[in-house]
Amino acid sequence: MSAVAGSEPKALSAGYMAWYRFSRNPAALIGALMVISVILLAIFAPLIAPYPDDVGAKVDFRSRHMAPDWAHWMGTDKVGRDILTRVIFGFRVSLLLVIGVLGVAVPVGAVLGMLAGYFSGAVEKIISGFTNVMLAIPPLVMALAIGNVLEPNLVNAMLAITFLWWTWHARLVYRVSKSIAAEDYIEAARLAGASHWHILTREILPNCVSVISVKTTLDAAFVILFGATLSFLGLGVKPPTPDLGTMVADGRQFLPEMWWGVLGPGFAIFYATLGFNLLGDGLRDMFDVEV
Amino acid sequence: MSALLQIKDLDVSFMTYGYRSHILKSVSLEVPEGGRVALIGETGSGKSVTSKAVLGTLPDNATVEGGSIRFAGDDLLNLPQSKRDTLKGTAFSIIMQDPLSSFNPVFRIGRHLDDVIYFADRRLGEKSDAANRRQRIHTVLRQVQLADPERICRAYPSQLSGGMRQRVLIALALLHQPKLLIADEPGTALDVTTQDEIMKLINRLVSDNGLTLLMITHNLGVVRKMADDIYVMRKGEIVEHGPLATIFQTPQQAYTKQLIAAIPPLYGPKVVDQKPVEAETVIELAAVSKVFEERFLFTRGAGHTAVRDVSLKIRRGEIFGLAGESGSGKTTVARMIMGLIRPSSGQVVVDGRDVSQAGRDGAFRRKIQIVYQNPGTSLNPKRTVGQTLTVPLQFSGGGRGALNERIEKLLAQVELPAHFTSKYPHELSGGQKQRVAIARALAADPEILVLDEPTSALDVSVQKNVIDLLHRLRDELGLTFLFISHDLSLMRNFCSQIAIMLKGEIVEAGEPRTVFGDPQHPYTRALIAAVPVMSDAEDNLKPKTSRKDQQQYLADAVT
């Protein structure tokens, strides 16, 4: 037998393979850069924004409705505030919304989904039945109803969206954990005497992490969009706090002559949404999961 | 005889994740016109890559770095793409391995066949109308012994049995009367009896139609019946080749010898008899039946009897083999013994206690552990070997230090080095994974081990090591094994008792020596007769079976 040395297929670590797939995907890299830029802009808004004073209820009628120029890259709004400044601060509201909504909806959905997927019988029927009922309600109608009952502000908008959002995660995690629960290694763990808690947290959860993180990233885009929709309809953040949806709604009144009133904030929504979507798609290819 | 297919110094490499791996290393191989050549080797040895290189279906990340492939005088690698495409399916075609996943479940069988014939005709620049195509399809289906082509064409893939699907796959390969037929592990996914039928069919087709066969397989018993020349492949190289008789009788290379030695004999002087055990009964099943009920929304559906009236006794320290084809109820019996499902009627007693009464008694449950068939799915991919082993060890007490010591001892018991604790399943080979799975079962300190085809997913040479390991463990730890398998030659040598199951019933049971020496039930005879063996002497010792018996008991026997 001739000796064969050093030519076997190399055993590569999972992390390396995932990173390799991600780095070969230019769209994902661009998405990651876009998301990072949005996050940095939001964090350092007071340092970056050209006119930090324009965030509040400042009124300067001399400079109202000015078209974009070198001093105001995105023009000014109806009371003379710099739109670029307000867009940069608007990212803060959007990201707060994302963190607030997904910070609650994802864990709640994941826990319920895992419980339903692992335990069969009554637990499964009740959780998945309730989730299905929730999914049957049109989200915008539901959010409008909640928004009308409660006072329109950031926290209530968050509540309204969260109330609907966990269902999608419950659905997804339910599907994934149900198939994992049928694997041989779960049965083996049970035969070895492992508790339900151990199986849920140590055996099933690690296998759900990739799917949850991909879904969460993709969701961030939709939450930004949904939040903008709500504030566009007047159910979101109250003025004068800068919010992308509210700004589009404000600018709409002066269309088509003052087109820059909607272009700047509209572009910002587009930019953030696209960034999260590209990143999410890239992560999905990287982890090789279906969401 | 001239060579129909001639591969010379073929080098193929793959780029994966930025690393280049050399998969085929100057592979040379000749298939004479009308000959039957087998390419044998283990998983990852490059057999399938070789066939893909011939067919021109290598994946995008593969590069042919050197060498030539000549088919009937044409240099395939230098042919223009369009010319090469016309050869596919017409000059040579392939019989796929997996009869289930090779079909799109939403299309009828007729559609699959028609598509192939239609596009191949187009590539050849021939016009054909639907009636003509249908006639050709029916002819081919009759050739592969599917008696009612009309019905087969109308059926969806899921409505056909595994054996019938495999026949349709063969028909697909034959549609354009190719000169060279490449068979990639035909029938390995099927029961031995079905596999036997498929082998006979391919042999007949080859001799009747004057085809040339290139067979890719890891099963040496199959090779013996289907090839004249053998090429042994290992790690991308041809290590030995020659006529069948020479390779089988006087293998030169250590690797070939190892492959041949790893095949357990069914008959003859090399057969090992396991001593019957004299000890108390540890598992007893009394008239156990299991009916699975299909329940629809409100109505009660028809019941499906998976196990009917099974009674058996297993003594302590015994290796009890439960044999039968897929769907015969072997696994259901094992799961009832483990208390995972309850019998519909009858009683399962383990160690003096009724399993269905034991309830959630953890200590009692841990007495029975299982080793699954597929080590790839029985280990959690996100947990290291150490973490996997910790779970059952938690109950044996002791601190952190004691735990690590126990893990090391377990790994030593299954002959793995101690540093494997920090490895993840994907870093291990199939045999190593199965050893970890065995260690996990042992960690719970069991008395009984259920082995659910523990070696069928492993390569033959690894199989032997795992079986040796299991033997040693039984002797050292005094375990009782319930061994579920359809590999009769393995069971002949490994088990001290054996029971043959057919459609949920035990039709024959006893010591392997008597069951194999003088099988009583016609099904047992048919089953044993279908096992591929390594020599004519063994073939002659097999029980005689009649065509009538085969048709009565085997799902896929066709006249």
Image (spheres, coloured by chain):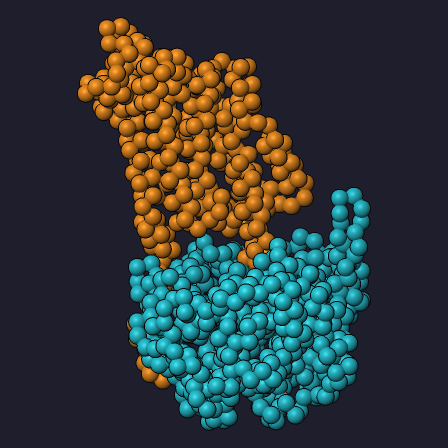
- Answer with left or right where residue B283 lies relative to residue A221: right
Instruction: Identify which residue, A63 or A260, lies in the foreground.
Output: A260
Residue B90 vertical placement versus A181 (above, below): below
Q: Residue at x 73, y 79 (%)?
A: B559
- Answer with left or right where residue B358 lies relative to residue B228: right
Q: Residue at x 33, y 53 (%)?
A: A20
Q: Residue at x 57, y 50 (%)?
A: A179
**Residue farthest to the top, as pictured:** A61
Residue B425 vertical placement versus B177 (above, below): above
Residue B393, x across and y down, in percent: 51, 58
Q: Residue at x 28, y 11 (%)?
A: A65
- Answer with left or right where residue B248 lies relative to residue A8: right
One can see residue B429 in this view:
no
One can see residue A211 in this view:
yes
What chain is the orange one?
A
Residue A112, x across and y down, in percent: 56, 38
**Residue farthest to the left, as pictured:** A70
Toward which corner of the image does residue B176 lie, by quadrant?
Answer: bottom right
**What colour has chain B?**
cyan
Residue B118 vertical placement versus A101 (above, below): below
Residue B239 vertical placement versus A97 (above, below): below
Toward which corner of the image does residue A231 lie, by quadrant?
Answer: top left
Residue B265, x across and y down, in percent: 58, 86
Residue B20, x across and y down, in percent: 30, 65
Instruction: Identify which residue, B381 or A161, lies in the foreground.
Output: A161
